[in-house]
Amino acid sequence: MQNVSGAADQRLAQLEQWLTGLGVSHGGLEPASSDASFRRYFRLRTPEGSRVAMDAPPPREDCGPFVRIAAMMDEAGLHVPQVLARDLERGFLLLSDLGRHTYLDVLSEANAAGLYSLAVDALLSWQRASRPGVLPDYDDALLRRELQLFPDWYLARHLRLRPTAREQAVWDTYVDRLVERARGQPQVYVHRDFMPRNLMVSNPMPGVLDFQDAVYGPVSYDPVCLFMDAFISWPAERVTGWLCDYWQRAQAAGVPVPDDRERFLTDCRWMGVQRHLKVVGIFARIRYRDGKPRYLEDAERFFTYLEEAAAAESELCGLVELIAAWRRRGDGT
């Protein structure tokens, strides 16, 4: 991995100075991960062991929620980075190191069941700790802002397409229904990106990262993130089996999932559609706004997820047919 401690980078120089001021002795900084946001992470070796420094430049990023939610997750029994030092005003954190390998790095047919089972253990611990009024609500406005990313960035910017008046009316109707379905579910703490790329192979397993955007919202959201990932796909039948296992374990743990399993699976499909559309919009935004085209290359799996949802939920067929028509008509490359 390339050492970057001498790079001509003002933020990096400030981070180095901050670490020196803390008395942290290390052999240089090296990139610890790539990120779709403006945050950067650097690994450093110290006499006390490996550490990770976070650079979250204000005003684009705010370290405060990370620090707060790390403490909440630690109290709930999850394995998260310990905040060893902080400068919230400048956007610097020094963290314990949960390791070099994510779930995404190591997942295979042979180990998936075991790794996902440990992830569900952690998720249930997080959900059991839920209390209203602590985290921001995953409210109507936020759900709609997320869905709007799809027409703003995927349709308008990537496909260079403007819906007709009739198409817009259909889209608006489905947005209303997706939001209503999400808001009608039991509400719990939601990590909001509980996926293999943010789960670490560590001791204990899993380490949990990238939780700073956590909210109080639909109970199905994080299971959908876990099993219908942006970067790895599994057969629909296997995903359904894992969701059913989660539902059964959640019931036993006292997490407020619906009493009826089929109702829970329906909630997951509708919630999944909201997330899939949001992520496609985010990936298009990352390509055109941030100059990172590789994320959009993974968007195709989300259209497969949409088709699978419509195959199980006939009410979603109109939306999926509309999106397919847009993709045929658009000229994104």
Image: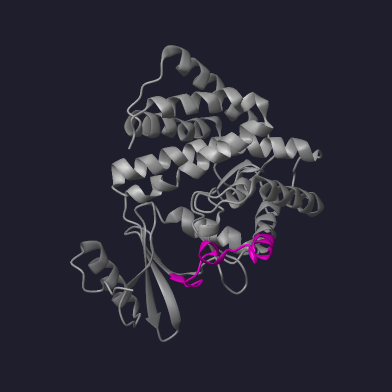
Query: Furthest residue to the front?
Result: 328
Query: Furthest residue to the top?
Result: 165
Specify whether residue 248 is painted magenta. no
Q: What residue sits 68% from the left and 57% below the top? A: 120
Above/below status of 44 relative to 199: below
Above/below status of 76 relative to 293: below
Q: What residue sits 47% from the left and 53% below the top? A: 65
Q: Position of residue 56 (x, y in %)?
A: 35, 57
Comparing 217 with 284, the one in front is 284
Report the span colored magenta: 95-117
* Side of 222 where 91 appears, left or right: left
Above/below status of 43 relative to 107: below
Classify the position of the C terminus by image quarter: top left
Q: Position of residue 124 (x, y in %)?
A: 69, 55
Classify the position of the N terminus by image quarter: bottom left
Specify whether residue 111 is painted magenta. yes
Comparing 197 with 210, the one in front is 197
Is residue 107 visible in this depiction of the protein?
A: yes
Query: Furthest residue to the left?
Result: 8
Q: What residue sits 61% from the left and 46% below the top? A: 224
